[in-house]
Image (tube, helix red, strand yellow):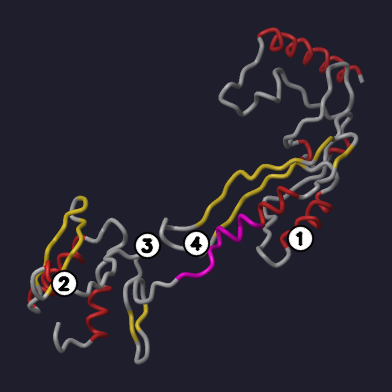
Protein backbone atom coordinates (compact mmCIF):
# COMPACT_ATOMS: atom_id res chain seq x y z
CA UNK A 1 0.00 0.00 0.00
CA UNK A 2 2.96 2.31 0.50
CA UNK A 3 3.08 4.73 -2.40
CA UNK A 4 -0.37 3.63 -3.62
CA UNK A 5 -2.54 6.41 -5.01
CA UNK A 6 -5.33 6.92 -2.49
CA UNK A 7 -7.94 7.52 -5.19
CA UNK A 8 -7.04 4.33 -7.04
CA UNK A 9 -7.09 2.38 -3.79
CA UNK A 10 -10.53 3.74 -2.85
CA UNK A 11 -11.97 2.81 -6.24
CA UNK A 12 -10.43 -0.68 -5.95
CA UNK A 13 -12.06 -1.15 -2.53
CA UNK A 14 -15.41 0.09 -3.83
CA UNK A 15 -15.36 -2.51 -6.60
CA UNK A 16 -16.28 -5.10 -3.96
CA UNK A 17 -19.94 -5.44 -3.06
CA UNK A 18 -19.47 -5.52 0.70
CA UNK A 19 -23.10 -4.88 1.58
CA UNK A 20 -23.85 -6.01 5.12
CA UNK A 21 -23.52 -9.79 5.16
CA UNK A 22 -21.34 -9.92 2.02
CA UNK A 23 -18.03 -8.62 3.40
CA UNK A 24 -16.10 -11.89 2.90
CA UNK A 25 -14.30 -11.19 -0.40
CA UNK A 26 -13.53 -7.61 0.60
CA UNK A 27 -12.07 -8.79 3.92
CA UNK A 28 -9.86 -11.28 2.07
CA UNK A 29 -8.62 -8.55 -0.28
CA UNK A 30 -7.79 -6.20 2.60
CA UNK A 31 -6.06 -8.90 4.64
CA UNK A 32 -3.86 -9.90 1.68
CA UNK A 33 -3.09 -6.29 0.78
CA UNK A 34 -2.14 -5.41 4.35
CA UNK A 35 0.11 -8.47 4.71
CA UNK A 36 1.88 -7.61 1.45
CA UNK A 37 2.56 -4.19 2.92
CA UNK A 38 4.17 -5.67 6.03
CA UNK A 39 1.28 -5.61 8.49
CA UNK A 40 0.50 -8.41 10.92
CA UNK A 41 -3.15 -9.31 10.35
CA UNK A 42 -5.33 -11.25 12.77
CA UNK A 43 -8.68 -12.48 11.46
CA UNK A 44 -11.62 -13.00 13.81
CA UNK A 45 -14.46 -15.08 12.35
CA UNK A 46 -17.89 -13.63 13.07
CA UNK A 47 -20.23 -15.77 10.97
CA UNK A 48 -19.61 -17.74 7.77
CA UNK A 49 -16.96 -15.81 5.82
CA UNK A 50 -17.72 -12.58 7.71
CA UNK A 51 -14.83 -11.56 9.91
CA UNK A 52 -13.06 -8.73 11.69
CA UNK A 53 -9.49 -7.74 10.86
CA UNK A 54 -6.86 -6.44 13.28
CA UNK A 55 -3.76 -5.10 11.53
CA UNK A 56 -0.71 -4.15 13.60
CA UNK A 57 2.92 -3.33 12.90
CA UNK A 58 4.13 -5.29 15.89
CA UNK A 59 2.47 -7.38 18.56
CA UNK A 60 -1.21 -6.60 19.26
CA UNK A 61 -0.22 -6.36 22.92
CA UNK A 62 1.98 -3.36 22.16
CA UNK A 63 -0.71 -1.31 20.42
CA UNK A 64 -0.89 2.25 21.77
CA UNK A 65 -3.20 3.83 19.19
CA UNK A 66 -6.16 1.95 17.70
CA UNK A 67 -8.06 3.16 14.63
CA UNK A 68 -11.39 1.54 13.87
CA UNK A 69 -13.69 1.40 10.83
CA UNK A 70 -16.21 -1.01 9.31
CA UNK A 71 -15.95 -3.36 6.33
CA UNK A 72 -19.60 -3.47 5.38
CA UNK A 73 -21.48 -0.88 3.37
CA UNK A 74 -25.12 0.12 3.30
CA UNK A 75 -27.05 -1.64 0.50
CA UNK A 76 -27.89 -1.42 -2.32
CA UNK A 77 -24.50 -1.75 -3.97
CA UNK A 78 -23.58 1.07 -6.39
CA UNK A 79 -20.37 0.45 -8.44
CA UNK A 80 -17.74 3.21 -8.35
CA UNK A 81 -17.22 5.82 -11.05
CA UNK A 82 -14.97 8.87 -11.10
CA UNK A 83 -14.20 12.05 -12.94
CA UNK A 84 -11.41 14.60 -12.55
CA UNK A 85 -12.78 15.93 -9.26
CA UNK A 86 -14.88 13.25 -7.57
CA UNK A 87 -15.36 9.56 -6.87
CA UNK A 88 -18.99 8.36 -6.95
CA UNK A 89 -20.69 5.24 -5.64
CA UNK A 90 -21.71 3.44 -2.48
CA UNK A 91 -19.34 3.71 0.50
CA UNK A 92 -17.23 6.57 -0.88
CA UNK A 93 -18.84 8.95 1.62
CA UNK A 94 -21.40 7.33 3.88
CA UNK A 95 -23.22 10.21 5.56
CA UNK A 96 -26.39 10.63 7.53
CA UNK A 97 -29.38 12.68 6.47
CA UNK A 98 -33.09 12.91 7.17
CA UNK A 99 -35.14 9.73 7.17
CA UNK A 100 -38.15 9.74 4.87
CA UNK A 101 -39.80 7.18 7.16
CA UNK A 102 -39.53 9.52 10.15
CA UNK A 103 -41.11 12.33 8.14
CA UNK A 104 -43.87 10.02 6.92
CA UNK A 105 -44.68 8.90 10.46
CA UNK A 106 -45.12 12.53 11.51
CA UNK A 107 -47.62 13.06 8.69
CA UNK A 108 -49.49 9.85 9.54
CA UNK A 109 -49.68 10.88 13.20
CA UNK A 110 -51.31 14.15 12.18
CA UNK A 111 -53.79 12.30 9.96
CA UNK A 112 -54.67 9.93 12.80
CA UNK A 113 -55.13 12.80 15.22
CA UNK A 114 -57.36 14.87 12.95
CA UNK A 115 -61.02 15.36 13.86
CA UNK A 116 -62.59 13.68 10.85
CA UNK A 117 -66.25 14.51 10.10
CA UNK A 118 -69.35 12.58 11.12
CA UNK A 119 -72.65 12.08 9.33
CA UNK A 120 -76.03 11.45 10.95
CA UNK A 121 -76.80 8.98 8.17
CA UNK A 122 -73.43 7.32 7.48
CA UNK A 123 -71.72 7.63 10.85
CA UNK A 124 -68.03 8.35 11.43
CA UNK A 125 -65.44 8.89 8.74
CA UNK A 126 -62.95 6.05 9.15
CA UNK A 127 -59.71 5.11 7.45
CA UNK A 128 -57.15 2.33 7.36
CA UNK A 129 -53.41 2.73 6.87
CA UNK A 130 -53.06 -0.53 4.99
CA UNK A 131 -49.51 -0.35 3.62
CA UNK A 132 -46.30 1.38 4.68
CA UNK A 133 -43.17 0.98 2.56
CA UNK A 134 -39.73 2.53 2.69
CA UNK A 135 -36.06 2.11 3.45
CA UNK A 136 -33.59 -0.54 2.35
CA UNK A 137 -31.46 -1.35 5.41
CA UNK A 138 -31.57 -1.20 9.21
CA UNK A 139 -28.41 0.90 9.36
CA UNK A 140 -29.35 3.52 6.77
CA UNK A 141 -31.67 6.50 6.62
CA UNK A 142 -34.60 5.83 4.32
CA UNK A 143 -34.43 7.92 1.15
CA UNK A 144 -38.07 7.22 0.25
CA UNK A 145 -41.21 6.14 2.08
CA UNK A 146 -44.88 5.86 1.24
CA UNK A 147 -48.15 4.85 2.84
CA UNK A 148 -51.44 3.72 1.33
CA UNK A 149 -54.56 4.88 3.16
CA UNK A 150 -58.13 3.78 2.46
CA UNK A 151 -60.84 6.21 3.58
CA UNK A 152 -64.46 5.36 4.19
CA UNK A 153 -66.05 8.70 3.28
CA UNK A 154 -69.18 9.91 5.08
CA UNK A 155 -69.32 13.48 3.75
CA UNK A 156 -67.75 13.81 0.31
CA UNK A 157 -64.52 12.94 -1.48
CA UNK A 158 -63.94 16.65 -2.05
CA UNK A 159 -64.15 17.34 1.68
CA UNK A 160 -61.67 14.58 2.56
CA UNK A 161 -59.18 15.71 -0.10
CA UNK A 162 -59.29 19.31 1.13
CA UNK A 163 -58.65 18.18 4.70
CA UNK A 164 -55.77 15.92 3.66
CA UNK A 165 -54.12 18.68 1.65
CA UNK A 166 -54.22 21.02 4.66
CA UNK A 167 -52.81 18.36 6.99
CA UNK A 168 -50.04 17.18 4.68
CA UNK A 169 -49.21 20.62 3.23
CA UNK A 170 -45.81 20.43 1.52
CA UNK A 171 -44.43 17.58 3.64
CA UNK A 172 -45.42 14.83 1.20
CA UNK A 173 -47.07 14.19 -2.15
CA UNK A 174 -50.67 13.02 -2.33
CA UNK A 175 -51.71 10.52 -4.98
CA UNK A 176 -55.41 9.89 -5.59
CA UNK A 177 -54.91 7.54 -8.54
CA UNK A 178 -56.95 4.77 -6.89
CA UNK A 179 -60.01 6.99 -7.20
CA UNK A 180 -62.89 7.44 -4.80
CA UNK A 181 -66.63 7.82 -4.47
CA UNK A 182 -69.05 9.67 -2.24
CA UNK A 183 -71.18 7.81 0.34
CA UNK A 184 -73.91 5.52 -0.96
CA UNK A 185 -77.37 5.34 0.59
CA UNK A 186 -79.33 2.23 -0.32
CA UNK A 187 -83.10 1.94 -0.55
CA UNK A 188 -84.83 0.80 2.64
CA UNK A 189 -86.16 -2.74 2.83
CA UNK A 190 -87.83 -4.73 5.58
CA UNK A 191 -84.62 -6.02 7.13
CA UNK A 192 -82.13 -4.97 9.76
CA UNK A 193 -80.26 -1.96 8.36
CA UNK A 194 -76.92 -0.53 9.49
CA UNK A 195 -74.20 1.79 8.18
CA UNK A 196 -71.08 -0.21 7.24
CA UNK A 197 -67.50 1.03 7.22
CA UNK A 198 -66.40 -0.48 3.94
CA UNK A 199 -66.58 0.30 0.27
CA UNK A 200 -69.05 -1.07 -2.27
CA UNK A 201 -69.07 -1.54 -6.04
CA UNK A 202 -72.44 0.21 -6.37
CA UNK A 203 -71.06 3.70 -7.22
CA UNK A 204 -69.19 2.27 -10.21
CA UNK A 205 -72.44 1.53 -12.06
CA UNK A 206 -72.69 4.44 -14.48
CA UNK A 207 -76.51 4.31 -14.73
CA UNK A 208 -77.32 4.12 -11.02
CA UNK A 209 -79.87 6.91 -11.37
CA UNK A 210 -81.89 4.84 -13.87
CA UNK A 211 -82.24 1.77 -11.65
CA UNK A 212 -85.43 1.04 -9.72
CA UNK A 213 -83.35 0.50 -6.62
CA UNK A 214 -79.99 -0.50 -5.20
CA UNK A 215 -79.59 -2.84 -2.24
CA UNK A 216 -76.70 -4.41 -0.36
CA UNK A 217 -77.46 -7.38 1.82
CA UNK A 218 -75.50 -10.23 3.31
CA UNK A 219 -75.43 -12.74 6.14
CA UNK A 220 -73.16 -12.55 9.15
CA UNK A 221 -71.64 -9.64 11.03
CA UNK A 222 -69.30 -6.96 9.71
CA UNK A 223 -67.56 -7.01 13.11
CA UNK A 224 -65.87 -10.33 12.28
CA UNK A 225 -65.30 -9.81 8.55
CA UNK A 226 -61.67 -9.99 7.32
CA UNK A 227 -60.50 -11.34 10.69
CA UNK A 228 -58.94 -14.66 11.66
CA UNK A 229 -62.14 -15.50 13.54
CA UNK A 230 -64.51 -14.66 10.68
CA UNK A 231 -67.70 -16.76 10.79
CA UNK A 232 -71.35 -16.79 9.81
CA UNK A 233 -74.15 -18.32 11.85
CA UNK A 234 -76.04 -21.04 10.00
CA UNK A 235 -79.32 -19.45 11.09
CA UNK A 236 -78.22 -16.13 9.54
CA UNK A 237 -77.22 -17.92 6.35
CA UNK A 238 -80.65 -19.53 6.00
CA UNK A 239 -82.36 -16.24 6.78
CA UNK A 240 -80.28 -14.54 4.06
CA UNK A 241 -81.59 -16.99 1.46
CA UNK A 242 -85.18 -16.19 2.41
CA UNK A 243 -84.43 -12.47 2.43
CA UNK A 244 -83.01 -12.63 -1.09
CA UNK A 245 -86.18 -14.37 -2.30
CA UNK A 246 -88.32 -11.64 -0.73
CA UNK A 247 -86.14 -8.91 -2.21
CA UNK A 248 -86.27 -10.39 -5.71
CA UNK A 249 -90.04 -10.87 -5.54
CA UNK A 250 -90.59 -7.26 -4.49
CA UNK A 251 -88.36 -5.98 -7.30
CA UNK A 252 -90.08 -8.11 -9.95
CA UNK A 253 -93.48 -6.81 -8.83
CA UNK A 254 -92.36 -3.18 -8.82
Residue marked by disc 2: 63
Residue marked by disc 4: 142
Q: Nearer the viewer, residue 177 or 87?
A: 87
Magenta span includes 57: no
Displayed quadrant of residue 153: top right
Q: Position of residue 170 (x, y in %)?
A: 70, 67
Q: Position of residue 44 (x, y in %)?
A: 16, 57
Secondary element at tag 3:
loop
Count of marks placed on residues: 4
Q: Which mark, residue 102? A: none
Which residue is drawn at the image coordinates 21% and 53% (left, top)? 46
Which residue is drawn at the image coordinates 14% and 82% (left, top)? 1
Q: Position of residue 249 (x, y in %)?
A: 84, 14
Q: Are marks 1 and 2 in contact (CB under 8 Å)?
A: no
Q: Residues within 10 Å of mark 4 (few under 14, many from 20)?
A: some
Q: Are marks 2 and 3 in contact (CB under 8 Å)?
A: no
What's the CA distance linking mark 1 and mark 2?
60 Å
Q: Residues within 10 Å of mark 3 (few under 14, many from 20)?
A: some
Secondary element at tag 2:
loop
Residue marked by disc 3: 75
Q: Give the magenta-colored segment's residue range.
A: 96-106
Horizontal side of 35 relative to 20 (left or right) equals left
Q: Earlier in the sequence, mark 3 or mark 4?
A: 3
Residue marked by disc 1: 165
Q: Position of residue 47 (x, y in %)?
A: 21, 50
Secondary element at tag 1:
helix
Amino acid sequence: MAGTDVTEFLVRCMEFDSSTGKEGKYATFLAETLREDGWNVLEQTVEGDRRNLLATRGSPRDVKVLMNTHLDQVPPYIPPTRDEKNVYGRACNETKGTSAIHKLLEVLDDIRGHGWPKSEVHGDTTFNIGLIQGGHALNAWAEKAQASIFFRVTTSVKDIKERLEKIVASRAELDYSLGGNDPVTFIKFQAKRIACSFNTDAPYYKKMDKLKGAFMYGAGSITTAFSAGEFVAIADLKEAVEMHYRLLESLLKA
